[in-house]
Image: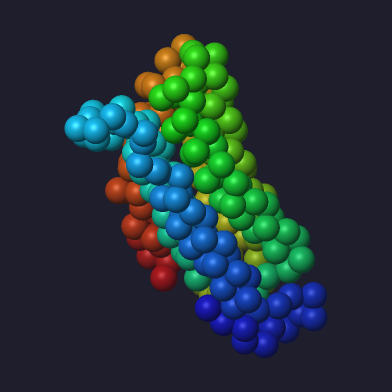
């Protein structure tokens, strides 16, 4: 994280944007657990009641892992930059918009898969998937911006590196779209898939891209 001087007056350092982004993600990931509450139950039936709200646990884990992976990717992304411009700040803000919203669909999914009708559960899962897309879409224009303004990179990253990385947002959008489609038929299955997707990205994320591993440091 650095606010070192940059040669172009239209550019600025990254420190304040990184600090603000870390704060938003930390608050969002903390708010998730506040939506899991002790369920109402008859005396002696706490264990059964806790088991009945399993969608709340799955939704929490899916959202926690999703925000965690976004944070790791965000850290890696800004670690390659020496400066940013106004457009990149705006796209970063759009990314944080999705992150800040996610506690809401997490709570909706937890409530309506457990207690709602099938139609309500479908609506809840669809909402969750749409917010997932919202968190994925900004990555593409962020990379495209670096293709146009590679001077924002730290050496030796360049426009070609940004071009190779720009495709990485699209598989995520496709995955969320597929999960939404499955949710129209089987909301519970879609919720589990959201968790599995987040776990997969968490396991495979190393904070380094294929380009880094092939020699760019």
From this viewpoint, is residue 127 visible? yes
Q: Residue at 74% x, 75% y: name it.
A: 11
Q: Is residue 143 left or right of residue 57?
A: right
From this viewpoint, is residue 166 visible? no
Q: Is residue 41 left or right of residue 176?
A: left
Quick check: 32 above or below 41?
below
| The one of 51 and 60 positioned closer to us in this rendering | 51
Quick check: 84 above or below 66?
below
Quick check: 158 above or below 138?
below
Quick check: 134 above or below 6?
above
Q: Residue at 31% x, 31% y: name it.
A: 41
Q: Residue at 28% x, 35% y: name it.
A: 50
Q: Position of residue 142 (x, y in %)?
A: 64, 55
Q: Residue at 63% x, 76% y: name it.
A: 16
Q: Quadrant of residue 131?
A: top right
Q: Position of residue 109 (x, y in %)?
A: 48, 31
């Amino acid at each position: 994280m650095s606010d070192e001087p940059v040669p172009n007056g239209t550019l600025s350092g990254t420190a304040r944007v990184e600090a603000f982004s870390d704060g938003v993600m930390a608050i969002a990931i903390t708010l998730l657990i506040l939506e899991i509450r002790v369920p109402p139950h008859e005396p002696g039936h706490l264990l059964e009641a806790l088991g009945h709200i399993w969608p709340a646990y799955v939704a929490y884990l899916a959202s926690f892992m999703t925000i965690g992976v976004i944070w790791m990717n965000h850290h890696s992304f800004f670690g390659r930059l020496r400066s940013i411009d106004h457009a990149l700040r705006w796209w970063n803000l759009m990314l944080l918009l999705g992150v800040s919203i996610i506690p809401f669909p997490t709570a909706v999914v937890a409530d309506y898969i457990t207690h709602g009708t099938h139609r309500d559960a479908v609506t809840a899962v669809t909402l969750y998937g749409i917010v997932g897309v919202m968190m994925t879409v900004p990555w593409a224009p962020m990379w495209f911006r670096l293709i146009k303004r590679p001077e924002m990179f730290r050496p030796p990253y360049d426009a070609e590196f940004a071009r190779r990385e720009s495709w990485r947002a699209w598989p995520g959008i496709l995955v969320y779209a597929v999960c939404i489609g499955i949710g129209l038929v089987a909301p519970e299955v879609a919720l589990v898939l959201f968790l599995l997707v987040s776990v997969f990205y968490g396991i495979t994320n190393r904070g380094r891209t294929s380009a880094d591993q092939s020699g760019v440091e």
